[in-house]
Amino acid sequence: MEALAAVAAGGKRGWWEDYREKLLPGLLDLAEMEQNATAIRTAQVSHLPGLLQTADYARLTFLQNVPEPSPPHVEHLVSHRIKRQEVLYRQSPVPYTAIIHEAALRMEFGGRSLTRKQLEHILAMGERERITVLVIPFSAGIFPGAGQTVTYAEGQVPQLDTVQLDTEHGAMFEYADAQLDRYRTFMRRFEAMALDASASRGVIHTIVNDL
């Protein structure tokens, strides 16, 4: 990834290199992208954002992979996902906006107890500095795209922006100007459909109380 390499050039070895023989390169690139971003926005329709997932929720998502990974590989995946979340806890956390469709919030993934704990975790994370959680309610109607997960990482200059897309074959990255313009528009439309942060918290609280 040329953009990421340009940003990281001359920097110290990243923690994600410890996973080089254990995980696919795309996951290492994702961690590097997040580590070097000046801001991150993500839009999610069917799953909750990786940077806001608990270990139990993350583990269950990986167990749905086809083919099903071995238990040791699942634990490597979970460990990597939790370590990625360091960008939200460090001394200068990256500004992070998670736009989540109500469908993902209401899906009882792993049962009521696990879902409740996961949503309570999202509420707690939404109180942290520089983290914004926005909800798109069912009432907003049709949404852009086809439910694809999109993460937009801003670089130190716009030319270093990177988009990461989740696919059945792993992480895919876009950084051509035309693609960046497309996904900037995508993210603006998604954010425009969302409730503000206060109303979004209200929706999540309602869902938790219903569980």
Image (spheres, helix red, strand yellow):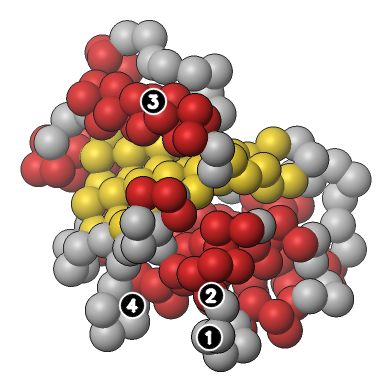
Q: Name the foreground residue: 186 vs 118.
A: 186
Q: In which quarter of the image is the C terminus?
A: top left
Name the kind of residue labelled 3 in the image. Answer: Phe
Q: How crowded is mark 1: few (under 14 residues within 10 Å), some or many (20 or more)?
A: few
Distance of mark 2 from mark 4, alpha carbons?
Answer: 20 Å
Pointer 2 with pointer 3, Cβ within 8 A:
no
Distance of mark 1 from mark 3, alpha carbons?
Answer: 32 Å
Q: In the rendered image, which residue does mark 3 sit on?
A: 186
Q: How crowded is mark 4: few (under 14 residues within 10 Å), some or many (20 or more)?
A: few
* Marks 1 and 3, the one that precedes in the sequence: 1
Q: Residue 174 is drawn in which quadrant?
A: top right
The location of residue 210, given as percent across then percent down, is 30, 36
Circle 2 — which element? helix
Mark 4 against mark 1, which lies toward the viewer? 1
Mark 1 against mark 3, which lies toward the viewer? 1
Q: Name the foreground residue: 108 vs 164.
A: 164
Name the kind of residue labelled 2 in the image. Answer: Ala
Q: In the rendered image, which residue does mark 1 sit on?
A: 11
Is residue 63 left or right of 129 when viewed as pictured?
Answer: right
Q: In the rendered image, which residue does mark 2 sit on?
A: 8
Q: Which residue is drawn at 67% across and 43% down?
A: 172
